[in-house]
Image (tube, rainbow, N blue to C red):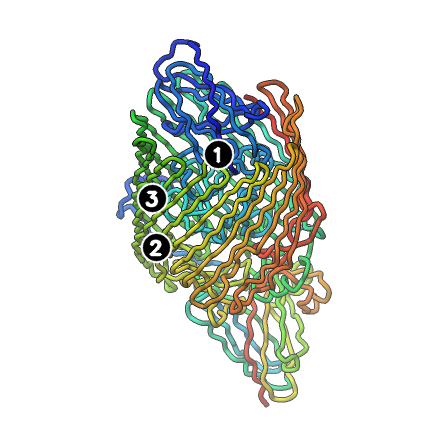
Amino acid sequence: MNSKNGMFILGCFLIMTNACQKNPIPINEEELITTLTLSVQKNGSNTITQFSFEDIDGVGGMPATIDSLLLEKNATYQVSISLFNKAAIPIDTITNEVLEEGDMHQFFYQSIPNTTIKNFAYQAPNDINDNPIGLHFSFDTDNTPTIGKLKIILRHQPDKNGLAVYNGDITNAFGETDIEIEFPVRLIE
Amino acid sequence: MLQKILLTLLIIGTNFSFATDCSLFVSGKIIDQHDKSPLSYASIYIQELKKGVIADSIGNYTIENLCKGNYTLIIEHIGCLPDTIPIVIDKHTFANFYLAHHAAELQEFILTTFKVSDVSTQTHHVISKESLKRLEGKSIGEILSNVNGITQLKTGTNISKPIIHGMSGSRIVLINNGIKLESQDWGTEHAPEIDPFSASNIKVIKGVGSLVYSSDAIGGMIILETPSLKKYKNIQANVSLVAQTNGKSIATSAKIEQGFKKHIAYMLQGTYKRSGDVSAPQYVLNNTGLQEGNILSSIGFFKNKWDVDFSYSVFHQEIGILKAAHIGNLTDLQNAIASDTPINITPFSYRIQNPKQKIGHHIANAKIKKFFKNEQKLEIIYAFQLNNRKEFDIRRSNRSTIPSLDMHLMSNNIATSYARQNKINKSTSNGTSGISFQAQHNYNNAETGIRPLIPDYYSYSFGVYDLEYFTIKRAIIELAARYDYTRFKALKFDKNNVLQKPIFNFHTYAFVLGFNWIDLKEIFKIQSTISFNARYPNANELFSEGLHHGVAAIEFGNENLHPENAIKWMTTLTTNYKKYLQIETGFYASKVYDYIYVAPLPEPILTIRGAFPAFKYYQTNARLIGLDVQVNSAPLKFLSLQFKSSIVRGKNTKSNEYLIFMPADRLSSSMELHHDFKKIKNVFFNINVHYVFKQRKIPASITDLKPSPKAYYTLNMQTGCQYSINEKNKISFSVSGENITNVAYRDYLNRFRYFTDEMGWNLVFRLKYEFN
């Protein structure tokens, strides 16, 4: 509270009139992550497909919307993650914040069941200590058409030196979860 | 707590000096009738002037600044009904009073009485100056938990809120220096902004309390008395030093008071506290440090029948929040709970890192009193309070230095009261009537960049009350009523950032009918009160919307809530057997209509952080029944024994289920040896065992994150003494060991019991120097 504002409120208080009441300013929620978008490209293909998890109004309010991933069986995919705050004006790209503080963030990926998608691998860029961040990654799909889920987790301040954390094992990563979402996955012929 | 003042009264009047109009004094000694030894710390109170003093450790007392007239003195040593001794003051007077001193060894919680309007017939306990001395350096919540029937609602080791008879938060009203504390009491992690070092005694009323202050104390009222300004006294000062091994903490407090002949007196008091990470028996609790600085200053002017005083106090605290409790989502929470010890323990540090809280509370007030003839008094109080709460979180992109929450609550109160007394034959009636106004504004700093949990609001209230006390022979009857109107206007943004201005109008009523009687031989005393009162929903119950990180839950307010109404009946019986054994039994039953509580929503809420369980405020009917039993015994002159137990049962009568988070049953036993030597007084050794049962009375429909913890005990000891260098200078010293056996335990009512054990063993060293 600046002192001018304080004096105004204090002065008004003594008179206690309606006219004195000040309207609050709407808050620009800079830090909110409303949207996570996966840009998915099959090896050997030029097509990039996007799938999003979106919850524009944050906690409560309207429910979140989630796209389903439609992938080919027995293929290798390259994925890049983009994060946005669409509640902020102008729309804010949070991807850059994560990239800048790469040593404080790491993505983890899980497949449910673990046969639907496999061989998750971190792709460059790495953080300043050459540890993975995970904004870019690749995976292989199963040999048979099936359905499953792809879970994406972002940990803030993880222990990047924890056992197997480098390889994407979340068990010893600790830290605080900033993102934990699941995309439905369908593998087709 | 029964003590009879025998009317063995010796008054020696001397023509000491010429008396100017109102500068007479009465002084003397309070003496044990049996062995003629002086009684320390008795209270002497002049009913007509509504002022009193406490005798010193060797029984000396002085009441100054008296006008000629007939007065009624009330003298108490270890609690009893206010008893009256008439005295005529027409010159400086020396009067020694002889008391039957059979229960003087029962040292804890000496009952003292200051204001008739505060006394009431309701069951109350006073933590005396002497008891406070033994608890210096502890938080207000910890100090209060020494009273039977009072427990703590904790968040970690530093944040403690009192629970009276199973109720806490905004159901409890705190009065600090005659002013109702207006703080952001909107969650379990908001502790009262009070410096216990500034209190001369603390009174706990297990009922509605005095309707002078407010009517919404459904659980109880806590009154902190700060020392009254010493009108004609010379310099008085004290310095305290408290060091604790667990947390490697240090607390120091100093106070100076002085009265000048020219009708001016002042007081200045300051406290500083610093603590590092505290430790559980097996590990360090990272980021549990604390830093606190408080100042209280007051100045008073007294002329003829006018008293005017001004005071200003500031409380500032920075508290680290346990690192292990900081979690992002439900998975993190489940991981933290599944792990028996915190993950990633780092060595001890004094550093307070995010997440942390910074709290500031300022009170500025002015009090004007005018005394009229026939014991009438008019009082006007104005108080301004500013409460600022900043919460810092771990944030991205260098935002960690920007608070995630920054709220300012400003309150303006003006109250005026008129007190009077009537005497008809052998009965006396004391009455107080008054009106009060409040204007309050809650303001969020928009620079946090996070939607506030509680919106901005303006609220205006008006209250009117009347209290009557009738003293008829050995009985006191209390009748009190109060009406309050509150207009509450919130300014909040909906999900589309459109400003909404919902307005609420609340009308609340309170009534108290109390009865207090003591038999002639003082073997039997009964206090019985029936009360009706109401509390309107507060800002978080109406509007809260957001994620509570510590418990990984989303909480929603409910704008359809209306005031909750409570009826409470409480009866306390005190019996004395052969002067050596005293039993105090307090029984209470309260029914709360439209009791406001949180209940889980059927579906969890999906967010980008994962799915969270969601809770919303609802209303139901509740019933709380309980029993507080205390046995004091002094079988030998140097030995006293104490046993305490309290039980409370809370039921949601609509769903016929237990209420969640009710205090578990508990027992506490202590033994104390004490002796006074010639120069070294008050030598004591105290050993205490505190036992808390497992809470099994929990609602079946609400799944707790972790089952209620096992029963536990703690063993505590304290020893100390007081050395009088001369009449004016004395030094007291004590050492206490808490949880000596280093038991690892968890308490049902600590919100961080999901993550860590309670504090391990701790040694506390206390040193105090007093100058009179």
Q: Which mark is residue B112?
A: 1
Neighbor class of circle 2 (other Cα within 10 Å; few <14, some 14-19, many 20+) is many
Query: Quadrant of the image for the C terminus of chain B?
Result: top right
Taking the image as shown, residue B444 lies to the left or right of residue B740, namely left
**Residue B364: mark in rendering:** none
Residue holding disc 3: B480
Reading the image, the residue beneath label 2 is B491
Which one is nearer the viewer's eye here, B386 or B506? B506
Quarter of image, res B376: top left
Q: Amino acid at mark 3?
A: Ala
Q: Amino acid at mark 1?
A: Thr
Q: Residue A146 location, x and y as percent?
A: 60, 87
Residue A86 appears anywhere in the view: no
Which of disc 2 and disc 1 is earlier in sequence?
Answer: 1
Q: Amino acid at mark 2?
A: Leu
Q: Is residue A174 above or below residue B674?
A: below
Q: Is residue B297 visible?
A: yes
Furthest residue to the bottom?
A: A189
Residue B506 horizontal side relative to residue B607, left or right: left
B649 w.r.t. B79: above or below: below
Q: Which chain is mark 1 on? A: B
